[in-house]
Amino acid sequence: MSEVARIILDGVEYELPVITGSENEKAIDISKLRGMSGYITLDPGFKNTGSTKSAITFLDGEKGILRYRGYPIEQLAEKASFIEVAYLLIYGELPNKTELDYFTNSVSNHTLVHEDMKRFFAAYPNNAHPMGMLSAMIASLSTFYPESQNPNRPFKDIELTMHRVIAKLPTLAAQAYKFSMGHPIMYPNNDLNYTENFLNMMFALPTDDYEIDPVVEDALNKLLILHADHEQNCSAATVRIVGSSQANLYSAISAGIAALWGPLHGGANQAVIEMLQMIKDDGSDLQKWVDKAKDKQDSFRLMGFGHRVYKNFDPRAKIIKKAADDVLDKLGIDDPVLDLAKQLEKVALQDEYFIERGLYPNVDFYSGIIYRALGIPTEMFTVMFAIGRLPGWIAQWKEMVENSEPIGRPRQVYVGATERNYKPLDER
Ligand code: CMC
């Protein structure tokens, strides 16, 4: 007999089916509970609520496991290219040579963005945050491809839209940077691979030759892979919920970028470096800042520490910490901010408050240090995260469409005023 959960409400017992995932994860299916009993469940922040069945990414926060389509993140970060991982996430399998060539060529063929989009960039203030520009630019792409707005078109059309987004996001990201610098934009070079092309659009100038350092390219490839998906996080859940209304893919990705921007999610990588810089400028008294982070009356938190699902360690942080050391070593960079980060990690990890709550450095604690070493400006850090996370968002959106998931529409427990009568202005 299949497993069931029993719940007693107002003296009546209800049976709810238990769902078991392929890694033996258990869930109580409450989807019919309200119809049966009139009750809903309440779980702010969805801390204990599964919103979907997904076959894309598995993670075990207690054991520090992260796998894309079954492949351990350690193997992918070590051996794969980002574009291969993008294919794996979206299509479900690692590509063979023909499939990889098809995907790579298709993405390369769509890297240009319409010249009219330059006029949007021209209208932003010089100090506009690139995440704001990127989110708006991706939403704006939908206006250039009106035929792509219906997500129920044949797969070939949907596939073209997915390839277009992957191709154009790095172009738009690099253009946002060039506009903020007042530099001429560099057009994509389709002879370069995905990561090389991005570096070239960011750092080449018409006046200078720019040679891509293989150490830099390798580190970027690794970082993008580590960020490529993370199951139902805030931005992926946003992409799925926006897409569930059958809004087009560009709008769903634009919303995902907006969700990622916040400092509790992808914006943490920028916030970590700003925090470390602030601690350094304040005299590097680490204990003072650790104490502030522990003080419940103080809103300060140690950025780059803690995670909703990882309570022992973040496997991505492990890989990235080593990569940060390697990159700085190979590029001969001595970064006092990295030294400070290491000292802070030590102080916090010995502190009872952080131990008790399972607060460890997360992926963003070290990614900013690498981005700095690669010459990427601080405000672009979250943009880098967005480029990495894009295949994950697309895979999540595609899975949601293919599963014909219903529109996302949570319920609530209303705690406001009960019925009362309108009073004219002079009686209030
Ligand atoms: N510094 C100090 N205290 C913290 C921190 C922190 N960084 N993170 C959590 N806590 C405390 C929190 O105050 C709470 O304490 P108590 O139980 O006494 O009330 C306890 O730890 C649990 O925290 P929570 O806020 O209930 O946990 P959550 O799962 O809702 O939040 C988090 C997870 C990542 C938003 C949070 O740890 C945080 O704000 N971290 C800093 C921001 C950050 O680095 N974000 C990047 C996450 S990794 C990239 C990504 O995947 O998005």
Image (cartoon, rainbow, N blue to C red):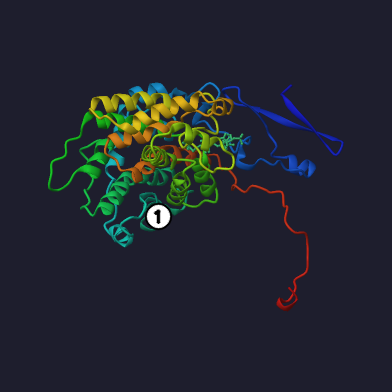
In this view, 126 is above or below 371: below
Decide which of 304, 424 is in the foreground and name it: 304
Q: Give the x, y percent position of residue 36.
A: 78, 41
On the question of residue 97 being in view, the answer is: yes
Q: Give the x, y percent position of residue 235.
A: 49, 43
Q: Which residue is mark 1?
A: 136
Quarter placement of the N terminus = top right
Q: Amino acid at mark 1?
A: Ala
Decide which of 195, 30 is in the foreground and name it: 195
Task: Categorize mark 1 by other alpha carbons within 10 Å: few (<14), some (14-19), many (20+).
Answer: some
Q: Give the x, y percent position of residue 96.
A: 34, 26
On the question of residue 84 being in view, the answer is: no
Give me the residue at 78% from left, 65% from top: 420
Decide which of 155, 34 is in the foreground and name it: 34
- Would residue 383 appear left or right of 407 to someone viewing this image? left
Q: Quadrant of residue 395?
A: top left
Give me the residue at 57% from left, 22% from top: 23
Q: Secondary structure at mark 1?
A: helix
